[in-house]
Amino acid sequence: MEKDIHYSTEPPRNTQDMKTQLINAEMAYTKLFSKNHEDEHLIRFWDDEIPDMYSHNYTFIKENRADLPEIIINEIKLRQEQNKDFLRIEVNFDADIKMLEKLPIKPEVSIYDYMYIKTDGFRNIDGNKNSVVKKAITDEIIADGKKVDILACQESMGLEFATRRIERKSKVYQVTNSPLDLYVCYAAGIAVGNCELMTLENLAKIEDFDILEEHQRKGYGSAVIQYLLQSAYEQSVPHAYLITDHSDTAKDMYVKCGFERVGYKTELHFQLK
């Protein structure tokens, strides 16, 4: 039976408060996997178990500063001293293109959009009614989720890395009282998709969302989004978000489900070897 939950107001849109909420959620997610060092200007994350995974090993720079080039150069030097292959920097402000061109190594720049929705929006989503979404609380469902993840990622990442990646992540899914859970989508008893949901007090994060290619455009993705939003809503979490590549074609589905763009972040990737 659905809870009678009423939310007083929508969160502020494109304000510092909303931006802070999203950034804090991103930091909380990364800390589930990575150790960190924080100082006045940045937070440095690293995961000793999978040091070649970009999303677990990066430096978050808190604000745009006049000495930003020096901060980046120091991070490059540190990673080189550690004999690392790459440096990934994440910022939530406009990166000065002229400044980037003056750095000793020119980075690859990627833009990602924050997409927001109220969780009670699950009522407006019409997913595939023949699908079944299950929380990975048994060894069998976890195994199905791992299989789907590897199948979805092996072409772009390679089989070896895709396998190591999901094995690393699944350790967190199985931690008692972890805020991060894995969900698996089934069609006719066959696992066709998976997705993560991290639930915090006021905000849920949807992450690592995949529907196998041969099952796309059949309403399974919408069914997963609907299920996750309803799950968050029933846990009294009023808002949810996800991050998508600025040019990602899946964004059309998110918009159709009711997500709105509320901001963006920039990633700078420096190849050191």
Image: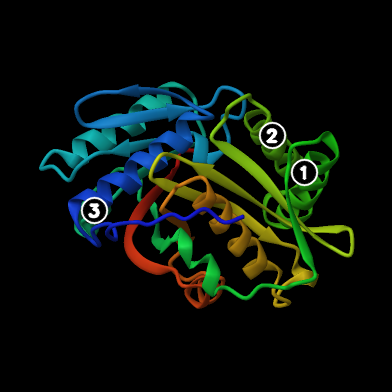
Q: From this view, report whether residue 186 is shown above or below residue 47.
A: below
Label whose residue precedes the other's in the sequence (1 or 3): 3
Find numbered disc 3 in the image and state the secondary structure of the residue it sits on: loop
User: Disc 2 or 1, which lies upstream in sequence?
Assistant: 1
Q: 140 left or right of 122?
A: right
Which residue sits furthest left? 66
Apparent side of residue 75 relative to residue 189 in the rendered image (left or right): left
Task: Locate residue 225, reporting x and y percent.
Answer: 59, 62
Question: Looking at numbered disc 1 in the image, what kind of residue is underneath it?
Answer: Lys
The residue positioned 17% from the left and 46% from the top of the image is: 64
Can see residue 249? no
Q: From the image, tell me which residue sits under label 3.
A: 93
The residue beneath circle 2 is: 170
Secondary structure beneath label 2: helix
Residue 233 is situated, as x and y percent measured from the top left of the image, at 50, 53
Amino acid at dot 2: Ser
Residues at discs 2 and 1 in contact (Cβ within 8 Å): yes
| Residue 189 in view, yes or no | yes
Asked if marks 1 and 3 touch (Cβ < 8 Å), the reply is no
Residue holding disc 1: 146
In the image, 249 versus 203, the foreground residue is 203
Q: For numbered disc 1, what is the local secondary structure?
A: helix
